[in-house]
Image (cartoon, helix red, strand yellow):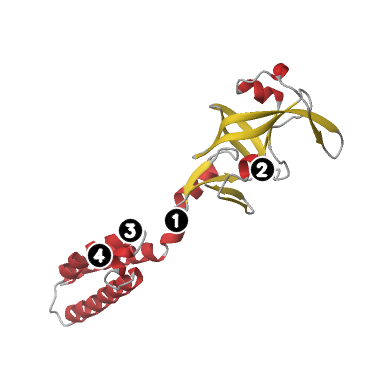
Amino acid sequence: MLWILLTLIAPIVIAAVTVKDSAIFDSFEVSVDAVFIAFALIVLLSYTGSLLLIYYNVLSTRVARNLTAWVCISFSVIIIYIFREEAYFVPDKVVSEILTSDQALRITDNIYDRKSVRIRKRNDGHYVARGRINNKVVSMFVDTGASTVMLTSNDAKIIGLNPSDLRYNVVIKTANSTAYAATVHLDRIEIGSITIYNVKALVAKPGSLSKSLLGMSFLRRLKSFEFSQRFLVMRT
């Protein structure tokens, strides 16, 4: 009897797990949670009733084994549904521990269905994004204190710019010194699955900057970005 009930309810259960919005269920004025509560109650009642029948020798031991297997499968589905929000990010979390800290990991926000990128913080406390500028690989320190993206002269060469042809007429004041940079516009910057086009940037005069910076001219073009204890999450 239980397997008949499960066969009838299974399509609804599968739909509830796989469909992100509940519009289908709303049209019947039934919530996804209500479906699972009903499913759990049916499983419990059916299992309890079957145990009583087995106790009074109405059902055989073979039926009892099959019944137990179905109940285990049913409760596995229920547990997966209960912890579906946490389980959604498990693969990404596992991969993020395997990847080096400057490799951007593409994730999808389960609530808002936005494409996002997560970068793990390095042991020295910095967030380093390894991306592509004009289709060339460049690593940049994420710096919210920098008003624009800033490139070293070496990275400028990598992406196809000639530092000797640039005009270093922008004064940059740091805590210890004054440096000069040239204004450029980058066709695009790609970090993981995020691509921002036509980004204003500066190229530092040779010898004045040791690491390229991913500054606010890129970050402010995102939908949002947030820092946690271990990750930087950027969303478009």
Looking at the rendered structure, the secondary structure element under dot 2 is: helix
Looking at the rendered structure, the secondary structure element under dot 4 is: helix
- For marks 2 and 3, give the CA distance: 37 Å
Label 1 sits on residue: 110
Residue at the location (72% across, 41% down)? 146
Marks 4 and 1 close (CB-CB < 8 Å): no
Task: Please tell me which of labels 4 and 1 falls first in the chain.
Answer: 4
Q: Nearer the viewer, mark 4 or mark 2?
A: 2
Q: What's under tag 3, amino acid-wise? A: Val
Say which quarter of the image contains residue 177. top right
Label 2 sits on residue: 216
Task: Please tell me which of labels 1 and 3 falls first in the chain.
Answer: 3
Side of 49 where 34 appears, left or right: right
Q: What's under tag 4, amino acid-wise? A: Ile
- For marks 4 and 1, give the CA distance: 21 Å
Label 3 sits on residue: 19
Other-residue count near label 1 (Cα within 10 Å), few / some / many at <14 / 14–19 / ≥20: some
Question: Of residues 196 and 212, which is closer to you in this image?
Answer: 196
Q: What's under tag 2, amino acid-wise? A: Met
- For marks 1 and 2, give the CA distance: 26 Å
Label 4 sits on residue: 12
Other-residue count near label 3 (Cα within 10 Å), few / some / many at <14 / 14–19 / ≥20: few
Residue at the location (62% across, 50% down)? 230
Marks 1 and 3 close (CB-CB < 8 Å): no
Q: Residue 123: x, y in percent?
A: 67, 44
Above or below residue 160? Residue 65 is below
